[in-house]
Image: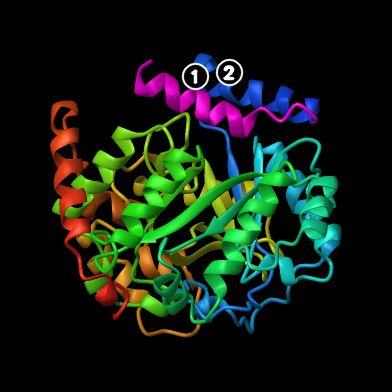
């Protein structure tokens, strides 16, 4: 069975939520529009950051520069209900809640129910430490389908060091197992940087996910939040060849910028958006630039504004914020060492016509099919020779 078919079957495992016929009908319509009708790409995925409070102290946390806002109040549950409907109207089939640590919220049930859970796939992004059998069962009953659990290493000491709390790894893996037992699908999110790509902790995490048929979502390190301006963390072309080879070698390894099924490239603004607790709409969690605020404008107006920018119209084949040094130096660097974020889109990018004249999307990093095995073999060799105690020292 070829890898492409295996990838589709893995996606079906996560997407076929039989208890939600309304969602299944909408998902079918979404893919018909995307592949058959070939009209403008409908919105697919919306990430709601509903609160930034957290019980861990992660070294790379991207939300630290977004935690305060003196221009707009926090969104209320009644507003989330309206915004979720706007998302559905634009085609969204997957709504996700995150933080901070979303399971700390006292009104989590109300927020989930405001998302029209019978019409969409609902996921939570969590560190997993708070997932008890009781909570997992309640999440399932409220309409949650999937947990995206953040894990940084298969070695407990490395994970705990990166997450800033001793014992986090043990609680996270207990939460992962509890969630699966409760009928929730689980995806593992892992941040990959210069500091951990060639470590046994990352290697063993990859193997664990593949062996247990758990989707492993690779999130590329970006110079944002706590890693603001940290160019040393981002991967170079040789590193990205390893990442691409990993994705090409297994149906259960993917990169966060790609849809599981569509695989066209970066979905920012076209297929996916990020909404802060204060209503700012970002094209990406790591690009702290607002294209508008939902206290003031409709989601359609804001998305249409974002899609005027050429680099958001096309599906970029590189992650602009994590791989593309020209984009980082020219645009993202304007957000470095600032606390009043998100900035406005025109402040950072200028007008769309200006961007069209001065910036061109880069070519992708490519690994030929006949190179994948040798690239993976070399990556494994380097991981096995790594000094693991140094992996998270930066």
Q: Does 23 sit above or below residue 219?
A: above
Q: Position of residue 70 (x, y in %)?
A: 64, 84
Residues at marks 2 and 1 touching, judged by CB atoms closer than 8 Å: yes
Of the pair 306 and 121, the residue shown nearer to us: 121
Q: Residues within 10 Å of mark 1 (few under 14, many from 20)?
A: few
Could you say whether the residue bearing mark 1 is in a helix, strand or loop? helix
Of the pair 380 and 285, the residue shown nearer to us: 380
**At 63% from the left edge and 79% from the top edge, which residue is drawn?**
55
Q: Which mark is residue 32?
A: 2
Q: Is residue 114 visible?
A: no
Q: Position of residue 145 (x, y in %)?
A: 71, 43
The residue indicated by pointer 1 is: 35
Left or right position of 333 against 169: left
- What residue range appears in magenta? 1-19
Left or right position of 40 against 133: left
**At 81% from the left edge and 67% from the top edge, which residue is drawn?**
76
């Amino acid at each position: 069975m070829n890898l492409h078919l295996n990838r589709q079957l893995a996606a079906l495992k996560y997407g076929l939520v039989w208890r939600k016929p309304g969602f299944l009908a909408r998902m079918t319509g979404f893919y018909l529009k995307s592949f058959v009708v070939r009209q403008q790409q409908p919105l697919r995925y919306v990430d709601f950051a509903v609160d930034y409070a957290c019980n861990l102290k992660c070294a790379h946390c991207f939300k630290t520069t977004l935690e305060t806002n003196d221009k707009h109040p926090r969104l209320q549950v009644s507003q989330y209900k309206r915004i979720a409907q706007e998302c559905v109207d634009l085609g969204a089939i997957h709504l996700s809640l995150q933080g901070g640590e979303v399971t700390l919220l006292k009104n989590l049930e109300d927020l989930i129910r405001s998302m029209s859970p019978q019409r969409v796939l609902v996921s939570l992004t969590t560190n997993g430490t708070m997932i008890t059998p009781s909570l997992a069962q309640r999440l399932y009953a409220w309409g949650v389908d999937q947990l995206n659990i953040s894990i940084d290493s298969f070695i407990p000491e490395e994970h705990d060091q990166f997450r800033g709390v001793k014992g986090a790894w043990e609680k996270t893996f207990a939460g992962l197992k509890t969630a699966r037992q409760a009928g929730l699908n689980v995806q593992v999110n892992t941040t990959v940087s210069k500091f951990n790509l060639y470590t046994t902790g990352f290697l063993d995490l990859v193997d664990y996910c593949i062996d247990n048929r758990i989707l492993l979502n690779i999130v590329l390190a970006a110079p944002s939040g706590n890693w603001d301006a940290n160019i040393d963390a981002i991967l170079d072309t040789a590193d990205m060849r390893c990442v691409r080879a990993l994705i090409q070698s297994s149906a259960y390894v993917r990169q966060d910028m790609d849809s599981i099924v569509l695989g066209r490239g970066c979905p920012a603004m076209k297929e996916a958006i990020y909404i802060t607790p204060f209503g700012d709409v970002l094209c990406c969690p790591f690009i702290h630039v607002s294209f508008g605020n939902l206290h003031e404008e409709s989601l359609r107006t804001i998305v249409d504004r974002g899609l005027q920018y050429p680099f958001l119209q096309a599906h970029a084949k590189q992650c602009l914020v994590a791989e593309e040094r020209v984009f980082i130096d020219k645009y993202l660097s304007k957000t470095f060492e600032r606390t009043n974020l998100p900035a406005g889109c025109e402040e950072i990018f200028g007008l769309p016509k200006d961007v069209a004249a001065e910036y061109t999307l880069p070519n992708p990093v490519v690994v030929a099919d006949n190179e994948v095995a040798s690239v993976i073999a070399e990556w494994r060799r380097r991981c096995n020779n790594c000094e693991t105690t140094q992996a998270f020292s930066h």
